[in-house]
Image (cartoon, rainbow, N blue to C red):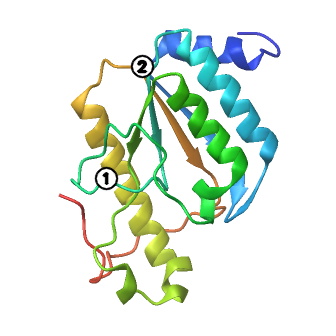
Amino acid sequence: MDGWMSVEDLTRWGFARSPVVMANEAHDGLTRCVRTREVGVRIIKAAHGLGVRRLAMEALPWPDDGTAGPIRQLPPVEGGYLGQPDMQELVMTALNLGWSLWAYEAAIESPTDINPADLVSMEFTNWRERELARNLCSLLGAGPTLPLLTWCGNGRRRRHRLQPQPAHLTTKS
């Protein structure tokens, strides 16, 4: 690969080399780059032409049955990451093409028991990163040969040494 490639060519290049392609969007909390999500719509359309039909997303709530998916419709949202119109367009592009969504967000057993200040701690961030990775690995283990587009964010600008898991956070079984 030499020089610049279009989004579509880069998507084809990625899926020609791996059944899993990860797109890391630019956001910091609720501040985001709309253009990144417009590029995401193009990635989905290009991936669709390659036979991809699964989109894994962090921040996507787990279905009530505790499985990662398939999720066939946008869950009800009030504000937040998934409530932003450009993110809804990205998700609806996939759903309208017949794709399924797959959750891999960290599950918090009792969210009301958490002090909001703890959500920005390195301890919580490290725990969440481990859970995201564990959940994504579980999802890939269930269908490693099926192509998967993974949409994630890079709002966490710093990395620190991993800390012990907080007692009030649990791993999803």
Q: Looking at the rendering, in which quadrant would you find the C terminus?
A: bottom left
- Residue 60 drawn at (x, y percent): 46, 52
Residue 71 left/right relative to 6: left
Residue hosting label 1: 63
Q: Looking at the rendering, in which quadrant would you find the N terminus?
A: top right
Identify which residue is drawn at 65% across, 59% down.
155
Asked which secondary structure carries label 1, the reply is loop
Amino acid marked by disc 1:
Pro
Identify which residue is drawn at 38% across, 85% down.
112
Identify which residue is drawn at 46% across, 90% down.
115
- Residue 19's label in the rendered image is 2
Amino acid marked by disc 2:
Pro
- Residue 156 drawn at (x, y percent): 62, 62
Total numbered labels placed on residues in the image? 2
Q: Quick check: 162 above or below 167? A: above
Mark in front: 1 vs 2: 1
Asked which secondary structure carries label 2, the reply is loop
Query: Which class describes the residues within 10 Å of circle 2: few (<14), some (14-19), or many (20+)?
Result: some
Identify which residue is drawn at 34% across, 19% down.
146
Quarter of the rendering containing residue 91: top right
